[in-house]
Image (cartoon, helix red, strand yellow):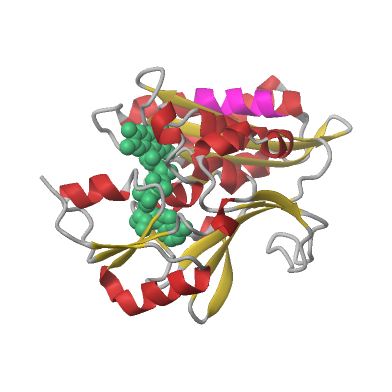
Amino acid sequence: MHIKELDYLSPATLAEACGLLHSGGPGAKVFAGGTDILPDLKRGRVNAASLISLAGLDGLKKIEKRNSTQPHPSTLYPLPSTLFLGPLVTPDALDRSALVREIFPGLSEAAASMAANQVRGLATLGGNLCSAVPSADLPPSLLTAEAELVLTARDGERRLALKDFFLGPRKTALRLEEILTGILIPELPRGTGTAYDKFQARDASALAIVGAAARLTVKDNKIVKALVAIGACAPTPLLIAAAGEFLAGKEPSGQNFARAGELAAQAIKPISDLRGSAQYRREICRVLTIRVLKRAFERA
Ligand SMILES: Cc1cc2nc3c(=O)[nH]c(=O)nc-3n(C[C@H](O)[C@H](O)[C@H](O)COP(=O)(O)OP(=O)(O)OC[C@H]3O[C@@H](n4cnc5c(N)ncnc54)[C@H](O)[C@@H]3O)c2cc1C
């Protein structure tokens, strides 16, 4: 199998990239690290006439704290500060970032769990989201972060909550002419802990059979807010509302985490495939949910 000849374009500005995406029509595809799109082109899963590389857009490689001015959908008022992640940030950079480790260790764990070194230094956060592969490692943690996406086209930008982004396997709400230009994580309240764990068939470089992320905010030994998200167990990564609702207001106890694990196992819609049966995935999901809740609590 080989890739048919196509144009590789290297815009120097975001405006230029948006213009090229507009003028290229459906045959123009965004190219970030290439670790998903190149195999897809080879297998004929994706057709492209041109690849628009984002590599020259340094503004999309940043990890930084920013003051927010726009209302966040979950609070309807601007939060004092936001963690901005550029879509070109690699899993390696996420894992090594002191800021990410401090604010959202669950996301560092998810990035560290991805692939082998070569892929971790090439792949990007934006590509991981836009590929919308159900087993992707970064979406569950970002769902528990209540992350927002900035989507930019030639005629302007819009914000979209990550929970509304995934529509199905390899399907997202990204419009043809849009580029994902930022991932925003609202400030987490004091007393919040986060964690991610993944079950895979071997120690490294394997896709998740189940991925689980948790975020807990605890005050005076009561859970103020809990979010659990599961990957690889449904057509899209899933926020498990029943687990979060059950835990809110309760004590952070082993018994309550065990019940949340059962609720997560009931809420997922796993398939049986080469990597595991649906029943196996439910059991792993239950166990991983308990594990990440305990770890998030230890960090809260
Ligand atoms: C050997 C190997 C191991 C892997 N292991 C893992 C793993 O353990 N866990 C895991 O989650 N994934 C894994 N992957 C999958 C892959 O590396 C990730 O999904 C990666 O994050 C994709 O990023 P990329 O920059 O390479 O995307 P690309 O291949 O460049 O792009 C992927 C898709 O997203 C679109 N896109 C990319 N960036 C943007 C943007 N900013 N705006 C709009 N559209 C965009 C592209 O047009 C394309 O459709 C593995 C891949 C390989 C080859």
Q: Which residues are magenta?
A: 286-296
Does residue 234 appear in this view? no
Residue 254, image x, y percentages: 68, 20
Which residue, as the protein is rendered here, is positioned at the far top?
A: 203
State the image quarter where residue 219 is shown.
Answer: top right
The stretch drawn in magenta includes residue 232: no
Secondary structure mostly seen in magenta is helix
Q: Residue at x 37, y 26 (%)?
A: 205
Does residue 113 appear in this view? yes
Q: Which quadrant of the rendered structure holds the C terminus? A: top right
Q: Residue at x 53, y 34 (%)?
A: 92
Q: Is residue 238 left or right of residue 247?
A: left
Q: Which quadrant of the rendered structure holds the N terminus? A: top left
Residue 279, image x, y percentages: 35, 28
Residue 121, image x, y percentages: 46, 36
Which residue, as the protein is rendered here, is positioned at the far right?
A: 220
Q: Is residue 82 left or right of residue 30?
A: right
Q: Residue at x 62, y 51 (%)?
A: 62
- Looking at the rendered structure, the number of numbered marks drawn on it comes to 0
188 vs 41, nearest the viewer? 41
Residue 125, image x, y percentages: 50, 47
Which residue, as the protein is rendered here, is positioned at the far left?
A: 1
User: Residue 162, relative to residue 294: is it above or below?
Assistant: below
